[in-house]
Amino acid sequence: MLKSMHRMLACTLSALLLVVPFAAAQTVNDGHFKEWQQFKNYVGVSWNSLSTLCPLDGETPCDASIGGPPGDWIWATGAQVQQLLSTFAPELETQPNTSNFFAAQAFLTAFQPTFSFCVTYQCGASGTGLTSSRDQNGVPIVGSANWGTTPVTIGGALGVGSGGDAAVGNFQVGAFFFRHTGPGVFAYDDAGSVASPDGGTAVASVLANDWIAGARATVLNVSLFVGSSSHEGVRLDILDGSVDVDSGTPAGSYTLFYSICDVMNGASCDDAVVTVTVQPYVINAVDDAGSISPATGGAAIANVLANDFLGTHRPTTAKVLLAAISVTPATAGITLMGNGAVTVAQGTGLGSYSLVYQICEIADPGNCDAATATITVRENAIDAVNDFGRGSSKVANTPIASVLANDRLNGVRAAAPAVALRQVSLAPATNRITLNLTTGAVNVKEKTDSGTYYLTYRICEAVSPANCDTAIATIELSGKSN
C-alpha cells in the first residue's frame, strides 16, 4: 500500500513538472515589495559578465544601455535571495540552507526550474541562480532549490551558498533580478510598437508593470499624468493607460513621458518613459505580365501598381516613387510610364521582355521593393472558325449571314476594318455563290445547282497583313424554296 502511494505521488509530481514551466508567471511578486524575474531567463551567463552590466550593491539598477536587462532591474545580493527563499521556507530567515521538499516544490512552481527530468517512477527538478555576492574566496554565491521523488522517497532542499566559476557560464544556472514594488509608487519604463503608420495601440496600459505599495497600479489607486511626447501622434489615454498612435504617424521611434501619483498621497509620485516604435509599411511589389501586338503597340500592362501593396493598401504614385531598373533584353521600345503603365512602341521586335521596377515609399525612401513585369510582344491571336449554312438552289438567298460572326481577333469578334477578308477557293467551282468581302455574307444566286459547296476564306489583321487564319464555310443547297 505504501509503495502504491509513493507511485501515485511520483506520477502526480510528474504531471506538475510538465505543467509548471508553462504555467509559471513571467515575474513573481514575493509579497515583500519586490517583483522578481524568472532566473531561468539568464542561464548560461557568467558572474563576471553580469558584473560588468550591473552594480553589486543590490540597490542600483543594471545599465540597460550597455546590455543589462531593461526596466530598472536590480541584481540581487545573496542576502536578498535568502530573504526571497525564506518566504517559501521560513527557517531560512536564520540559516542559509534547509531540507524542505514542499517548500522547494512550491518555489519551483512559482519560478521555472533550470533543470528537470522525469523517468519511470522518478522525477526531479532544480533551479539555480547567480546572486551579486561572492564569498571570501571570490566564488559566486548562488541561490538554489531542488526536489526529487522515487517510488519510496521524496526529498527537497533550498538555500544559498558558494558555487561555480565566476568566469564560466552554466546552462543550468540563471541569475536573480528584482525591482521594487513598494513602499510608495514605482513607475517602470514601457516599450511597444504598431505594425505600420496606420496606427493603433502600441501599449495596452503603461500601468501594467507599475506598482504602488506592493500592488499593481491601476486607474483606481494612482493618478496618471501625461508628460511630453516626441510626436503629437503618439498619445497617452489617462483613462485606461493605453498608448495610442494616430494613423499617419510616420515610421520611426518615439518617446512619451508620464507620471503616476498615489491617489491618497499626491506627493508620492514616480515617472517613466514609453518607447514607441512605428514600424514601416510592409511594401510588396508583385510581378506582372502582359502582352501586346507590335503592329499596334500601346499599353501591355495598364498599371504595375495595381497588384502591389503598401501595408494593406494599394500604392499610388502619391505614396510611392516608381522607377524602372532594367529591361532584358535591352530595347528602347518598352517604357515604364509615370502612371505605372508599361507601354510598347509600335514595331518592337517579337519576343518576351523582362522589365524590373522598384517602388519606394515617399515618406520612407529606404522602404523599397522590386518586382518584374514580363511583357510578351506577339501578334494578336487571330482565329477563323468554320461555318455551316443551308439554303435553296432555286431562289436567291443568304445561307450564312457572315462568316465573321464566330471569328476572333485578340479575343473579340473579328470585323472590318480590323480584319481584311478574302476568298481563297470554292469547291465545286461556281460563279453562283459569292462571299461579300465587307460583311462576310455568303450569297447564293437563283437557279444554282443543288449540292454541297466548300468555300475557303482567310482573315488577316489589317495592321499586320501577315497575321492570318483560314476557315471553311460549308453550304448545303437543295431544290426546296426555303
Image: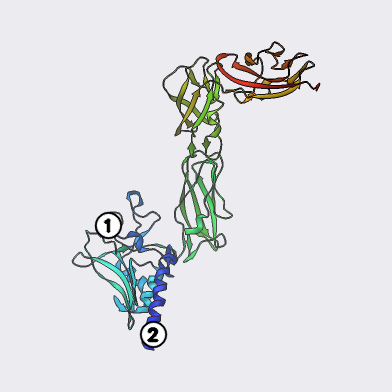
Query: In this rendering, does residue 465 appear at all?
Result: yes
- The residue type indicated by label 1 comes to Ser
Residue 253 percent across, percent down from the top left: 45, 42
Expressed as whole percent of the image width and height from the top left, the position of residue 184 reads: 46, 63
> Badge 2 is on which residue?
4
Reading the image, the residue beneath label 1 is 51
Residue 183 placement (x, y as % from top left): 45, 65
- Is disc 1 placed on a helix, strand or loop? helix
Task: Tell me the quadrant of the picture where the C terminus can be found.
Answer: top right
User: Is residue 86 visible from the viewing direction of this image?
Assistant: no
Q: Where in the figure is residue 164, as x and y percent of width and height?
A: 23, 65
Quadrant of the snapshot with the N terminus: bottom left
Residue 161 lies, with reference to residue 476, above or below; the image says: below
Question: Residue at (56%, 35%) from the top-left corner?
Answer: 314
Horizontal side of residue 355 vs 45, given as left or right: right
Disc 2 packing (10 Å; few <14; some 14–19; many ≥20): few
Residue at left 55%, top 38%?
Answer: 248
Q: Secondary structure at mark 2?
A: helix
Q: Quadrant of residue 445?
A: top right
Answer with mark 2 or mark 1, whichever residue precedes in sequence.
2
* Mark 2 residue type: Ser
